Image (cartoon, helix red, strand yellow):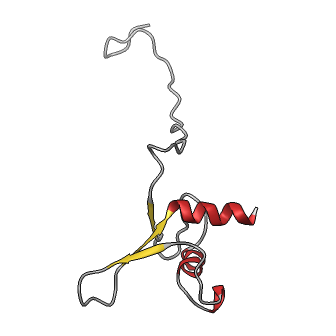
């Protein structure tokens, strides 16, 4: 049966997005904290939990178990916290 555009055979396509497998070439080296109210797309952890794991405080006896860095301009009080992916995954694996 011909359509208005001249196509004779119509098929359906699978519109499910492909699953992304993390390999050494695609896994991130650093993760940015998720937005408030959102969760980490790699671990499902909340922003608050990630902060407790990366910032020295009473929740971790002053020794954060996960490595992170803060990028900020000279003299700025705020910055962007980046979490080391391997450090976070290693910590979570130790809990299992």
Residue ID at (32%, 11%): 6
Up/down of 12 relative to 92, above or below: above
The quarter of the rendered structure image containing the N terminus is top left
Q: Residue furthest right?
A: 96
Q: Nearer the viewer, residue 9 or 23?
A: 23
Q: Nearer the viewer, residue 13 or 80?
A: 80
Residue ID at (62%, 61%): 90
Q: Quadrant of residue 40?
A: bottom right
Q: In which quarter of the image is residue 87?
A: bottom right
Q: Which residue lies furthest to the front in this view?
A: 63
Q: Left or right: 32 with respect to 21?
A: left
Up/down of 18 relative to 93, above or below: above
Up/down of 57 relative to 70, above or below: below
The quarter of the rendered structure image containing the C terminus is bottom right
Residue ID at (30%, 80%): 72
Q: Which of 12 and 90 is in front in this view?
A: 90
Residue ID at (51%, 23%): 12
Q: Left or right: 81 with respect to 67?
A: left
Q: Position of residue 85 (x, y in %)?
A: 51, 61
Q: Which of 43 and 53 is in front in this view?
A: 53
Q: Where is residue 27 in the image (x, y as percent from the top left)?
A: 48, 50
Q: Position of residue 23 (x, y in %)?
A: 51, 42
Q: Position of residue 60 (x, y in %)?
A: 64, 85
């Amino acid at each position: 049966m011909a359509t208005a555009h001249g196509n004779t055979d119509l098929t359906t396509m699978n519109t499910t997005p492909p699953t992304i497998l993390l390999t050494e070439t695609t896994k991130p080296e650093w993760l940015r904290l998720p937005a408030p109210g959102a969760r980490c797309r790699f671990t499902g952890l909340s922003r608050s939990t990630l902060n407790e794991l990366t910032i020295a405080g009473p929740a971790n006896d002053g020794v954060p178990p996960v490595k992170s860095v803060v990028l900020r301009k000279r003299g700025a009080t705020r910055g962007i916290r980046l979490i080391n992916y391997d450090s976070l995954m290693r910590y979570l694996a130790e809990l299992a």
